[in-house]
Image (cartoon, rainbow, N blue to C red):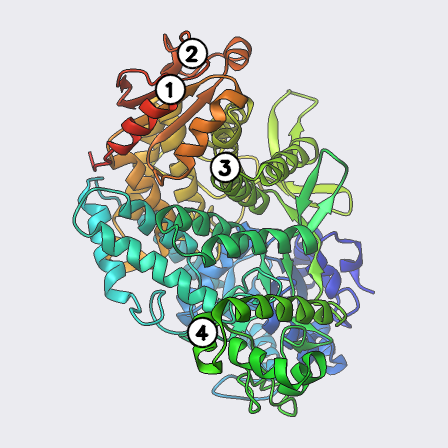
Amino acid sequence: MNRLANEISPYLKQHAGNPVDWFPWGDEAFSKANEENLPVLLSIGYSTCHWCHVMAHESFEDDSVAELMNSNFVNIKVDREERPDIDSVYMTYTQALTGQGGWPMTIFLTPDKKPFYAGTYFPPTDNHGRPSFSRLLESISKAWQEKRTEIEDQATDITDKIIQSNQSHAAHQAKLHQSISDQAVEALTNIYDSEWGGFGNAPKFPSPANLEFLLAYGSLEKPGSNHATEMAVHTLEQMLSGGIYDQLGGGFARYSIDRTWLAPHFEKMLYDNASLIKVLTQAHQVAPDKSQFPKAVHETIAYLKREMCLSINNEEIAFYSAQDADSEGIEGKFFLWTTAQFEEALGAEEALIAAKVFGVSTSGNFTDPHNPKLVKRNILSRRNSIFEIAKDLQMDGAELSGKVDSIRARLFEIRKNRIPPDRDEKVLTSWNGLLIGALAEAGRVFENQKYIENAEKTAQFIYRNLWVIDSKNSQKYLMHIYAEGQAKVLGQLEDYSYLGLGLIDLYRATGKQSYLNWSRELFNIIIDKFHDEKAVGFFDTSTDAETLIIRPKSIYDASIPAGNGSAAKLGAILGRYFNNNHWLNIAEDATSLAAASVQRGVSALGTSLQAILYLTSENQEIAIVGDPKDRRIYERELARRYVPLMLLALTSPDEMSTYQPLDIFTGRETSNSPVTAYICRDMVCNTPANNIKEFKTQLAELKINAS
């Protein structure tokens, strides 16, 4: 076992048994590189990454490759989910050098952490224009020995260029105006796949931030808003019909390798599922006739609770990071079916029905280049409606629907007996923050108190285990990761911003101002520790974090929402709740970085575009005052409507006596009726609604406009 055996990251532990003399990122590794005049081989990946597993089996478990690595390099393993800051820094270089990025990421560094060569996956033999990993190691080692000074000069030059590019990009701003959102919708339309939904060609990612932006834009009373809604709704429909959605167990895989959403890489990530729960909940409000949207929300939440939940006690739960693509060393094996397996499970008659419902054929629809002998296997999909299939089978639609429910249940129970994919059992503050918001919003819209309770329990877990008070100076801060009973790594911008946004959703679902106040506390730390005081926007790491060769500032969404856009969105919303123009100005400055990039990078700006909508749309508010049990009928009516850009404020007499009331409640206590509701524009309110009939009337007259 190597040093990684002592780490808490599941990804690092996966490599603890390698013959490679791995180091975790830290001073020990770089001191050794300096003392022995060796280059550093930095390998970055994550535990559920299929190609990371492939390279590990082909190279890192091979004794001859390990000998080359150990003799000529100091070898460092990094879990990108544990250290997103390190990943971001060296991904910037890898993309600049190769024109693409991905994992596993392989970077060669000088002992002072400066990169001089990079790539992603390298095969064990020369293949498709890529050198074998062994040949690459020999070439890099030879060059280091013969041309070290030249390499170090080159690395310094490259690092200086990265720093300059980072500063230049961060300085590129555009003034906010209404037309930026219009331009973004037009740019997304230009890359929209009108047949299969989504944007661009294969591979396709769910991009929930873009879908959430389009739905929010669609709520505006302006030309093009209907088309924005249609793009989002159609994309979700197509995704739910494909193999990217687990048709038996619920939940989404990370991305599809084809244009039609059929063939995924099968790993399931918490961040995707959290974000898609939320956007599907919003899509249900927009298109309540689409029964597959609430069904997918409930199935995905059930999947997370069943397979991804860490239960501490009755008051605290949290959710693990990811589930692997592979089981028994084979990608997708847990999820794939043959017609023979259908017949064995269901009998010939029902197997025929199941094959038509789930798109299963004798020849199969999935091939694995690493296991060419495994053939005739199928990814399950739902391309045709029950009623189309019923017509084809000459069956009654309702009867077939009931039969399909029974078939699904039996297939799911049989699948449970298979060896499941591994699970990455670390808890990340940021991704749990996303899920808090999703559960709270789903609970509010679907009137499911259990979802809201689970959101509260997750927030409680973070508060007790990852929210730290420094005993020396009483300062509070978040930690990023929890595993094996301990918290590790200082919180990053994504932790503060995702959790802050999730707490706002939790406030909207409960009316408990303590959640909103905690969100405000997090944003104050963001301003103090992450805000770029010399320019605009937010850095990914705090002033207390380890100094890397650059201090990254994430403007573009990647696999997760951009920290800069998330923090700007948080500031835009909190600025309105707490009537704080300074926060609004900071948020506006931060979004100006994204506004300048709409034409060239629109598909990666969904989070910032949401913030821009908040900042450029007319200020409208709904405030409801009353005890929670009395407010419920008003909240239920409001939950039927999709009003994403309106400020929703809830309180009760008890809350108002406990906390400093929000400005919107000043002078707006309850009247003689148990509940009083106010619908306002820029804090100027209509006649108070003291009964549900009047509230419905005022809601029906609502129009949301760009400012």
As measured in the structure, the alpha-carbon distance from the residue carrying label 2 to the one carrying label 3 is: 24 Å
Q: Quadrant of residue 691?
A: top left
Instruction: Tell me the SS state at disc 1.
Output: loop
Marks 3 and 4: in contact by CB < 8 Å?
A: no
> Image check: 587 left or right of 654?
left
Above or below for 530 versus 111: above
As measured in the structure, the alpha-carbon distance from the residue carrying label 3 to the one carrying label 1 is: 21 Å
Say which label, 4 or 3, has the lower sequence index: 4
Residue at the (53%, 37%) spot, across then down? 499
| 163 or 224, nearer to the observer | 224
Say which label, 2 or 1, has the lower sequence index: 2
Name the front one of labels 2 and 3: 2
Q: Residues within 10 Å of mark 3 (few under 14, many from 20)?
A: many
| Residue type marked 2 | Ser
Q: Which residue is mark 3?
A: 444
Q: Residues within 10 Å of mark 4 (few under 14, many from 20)?
A: some
Say which label, 2 or 4, has the lower sequence index: 4
Marks 4 and 2: in contact by CB < 8 Å?
A: no
Say which label, 2 or 3, has the lower sequence index: 3
Marks 1 and 2: in contact by CB < 8 Å?
A: yes
> Image check: 361 left or right of 684?
right
Residue at the (41%, 43%) spot, across then down? 564
Residue 536 is situated, as x and y percent measured from the top left of the image, at: 34, 37
Say the numbered circle drawn on residue 691: 1
Q: Which residue is mark 4?
A: 383
Above or below for 370 versus 239: below
Residue at the (49%, 55%) spot, across then down? 89
Name the front one of labels 3 and 1: 1
